[in-house]
Image (spheres, rainbow, N blue to C red):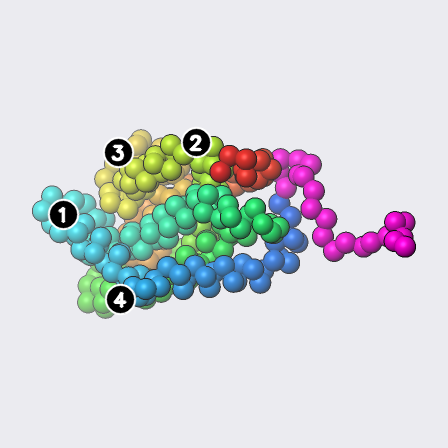
Amino acid sequence: MNNTNQNTDWDIIVKPQSNFFKLDLKELWSYRDLVLLMIKRDLTALYKQTILGPVWMFLQPLFTTLLYTFLSHQAQLKTDNLPPLLFYLIGQTYWLYFAECFTKTSNTFIANASVFGKVYFPRLVMPISVMFSNLIRLGIQMLMMLCAYLFYLITTNDVTPSYSVLALQPVLILLLGLFALGLGILFSAVTTKYRDFSFLLGFGLQLFMFVSGIVFPASTFSEKTKFILMFNPVMSLTEAIKFGLTGQGYFSVVHIISAVVVIAIVLFFSIMVFNKTEKTFMDTV
């Protein structure tokens, strides 16, 4: 005879969100092993069944850098008095980190729909794991950048590091990743219903690069235009990173603070939209 009055203690109770903004850091921390597993999966699956394997981590920024270096010599583009190869290599290294985080997190719901429909875990685990797996890739790609950087540091007088700003580089990289994370999960929520945004993303990201200090430095623009463009967190952060490494570029405490504010607003709004979409996305994917 079954005892229907028997009490059962559950470890986890899954229920609908009671509010739009919910960020349970304790729950995310309890799933840290899953985050590590996803990071390992991203790194191993990306270059699986390729001939060159991880070498592609170096080839992508290198080929893009060589192309822009050639165009710089032909069109006499400004590079903040830095050797064009070094200027574009620094820009491409950090831009690829932002772009990869953004594009991969923007596909969170669609790419993982089969998993989300079968088992429960905090959905933010997926985009967070993407941010950290790309952080590892950035660390590997920085090895090539540092080789070129040390060469020009030793052989020329154009590179004069600002050590006080250079010490902030880990914080600046983290902010860059958080901005990509916020934009990515916002787009992932929107693209579940409107697939047009997935086509807009690739095109828009290419245009966004041209107003982010990657191809044209801040010094290219007039003071008024530069002041406005520096409210773009990617531009203010990459310019600060470049200034710390080389002493060339534009560093402003005001614009770094504004970048932190913009990133905080984007993260808050994106998590709110993400939580709202999480309830019903299986009906639209």
The vertical placement of 186 against 88, above or below, is: above
**What amino acid type is highlighted by mark number 2?**
Tyr
Magenta run includes residue 131: no
Q: Position of residue 135 (x, y in %)?
A: 42, 58
N-term mark: 2 or 4: 4
Nearer the observer: mark 3 or 4; the answer is 4
Nearer the observer: mark 3 or 2; the answer is 2
The image's mark for residue 51 is: 4
N-term mark: 1 or 4: 4
Mark 2, residue position: 194
- Dot 3 lies on which element? loop
Nearer the observer: mark 1 or 2; the answer is 2
Dot 1 alpha-carbon crowd within 10 angstroms: few under 14, some 14 to 19, many 20 or more? few
Mark 1, residue position: 71
For the record, the magenta segment spans: 1-22
Q: Position of residue 165 (x, y in %)?
A: 40, 55
The alpha-carbon separation of the residues under discs 1 and 4 comes to: 30 Å
The residue drawn where x is 66% and y is 39% is 17
**What amino acid type is highlighted by mark number 3?**
Ser
